[in-house]
Amino acid sequence: ENSVIWTDLAHPLTVGTEVLNSVYRVTFTNIDILHVREPAHNSRALAIHVGDDGTVHDITFTDIRIESLSPPFANGDIDLIQLEVRPNSFSKTKRPGYIRNILFKDITLVDAPFFPSIEIQGFDEAHTIENIRFENVVVKGKQILSLEDGKFHVNQFVKNVSFSTGSNAPG
C-alpha cells in the first residue's frame, strides 16, 4: 500500500509461485510502478502464479499506475497481467491449485513499446481460474471492456471474466 516501485530484476506485484496453502484477502492499493523490466523472461507488472496445490482467492489490485513496461533484455514478451495455475520449477507438490475472485480496479498502464498481453491460464477442468473482474482498466489510453479490447490469452479452463467502466454498470 502507498508505494513507489522500480524493478529491473523481477515482477513488481506477484502472489506465488509456491502456494502450498490458501492466500486470501490481500489488497495492493495506491501503488505507482515507475518501470518494469525482467532481464531474462517475460516482463509482467501484476501476477498470480499458483504452482502448487494451494488456492489464491479474494485478491484486489486497485489504484495502480504503471508508467513503463519494457520488454526483457533476452527473449520474451511483455504482459500487463498474468494469472496462471501450473506446476513449475519452484513447485513442491507438483499438483496444481486454483485462483478465484480476483479484482483489477483502476489500473492504468501509461507506456509500453507495444500493446501488452493479459494472460489467464487455468491448468485443467479441475484446476481452474474463476471470477476475474476488470473494472476501469486502461492500457495506453484504451479502456478495456472486453476480451477483444485487450490482447487477452485465455484458455478453456478460465470461467467468468467480467469488465466494467467502474460506474457499477455490468460489464
Image (cartoon, rainbow, N blue to C red):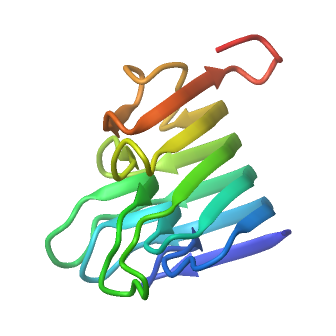
User: Which residue of the protein is positioned furthest toward the top in this rendering?
Assistant: 169
Instruction: Please tell me in which quadrant of the rendered image residue 23 appears.
Output: bottom right
Q: Quadrant of the C terminus?
A: top right
Q: Is residue 142 visible?
A: no
Q: Is residue 11 above or below residue 111?
A: below
Residue 130 % position (x, y): 56, 39
The quarter of the image holding the N terminus is bottom right
Question: Is any atom of residue 7 visible in this view?
Answer: yes
Q: Is residue 154 above or below residue 64?
A: above
Most distant residue in the left direction: 75
**Which residue is pictured at 46% across the width and 50% down the height?**
111
Residue 2 coordinates in the image, percent (x, y) = 85, 69
Where is 5 relative to 142, above or below? below
Q: Nearer the viewer, residue 24 or 44?
A: 24
Q: Residue 157 occupies which quadrant of the picture? A: top left
Q: How many labels sit on residues? A: 0
Find residue 80 and report its horizontal and vertical position in percent: 45, 52
Relative to the observer, which residue lies in front, 70 or 25? 25
Image coordinates for residue 67, horizontal then vertical, percent: 56, 57
**Is residue 12 toward the left or the right of residue 22 in the image?**
left
Residue displayed at 66% across by 53% down: 65
Q: Residue at x 32, y 77 (%)?
A: 88
In the image: residue 168, left or right of residue 35: right
In the image, 14 versus 19, the foreground residue is 19
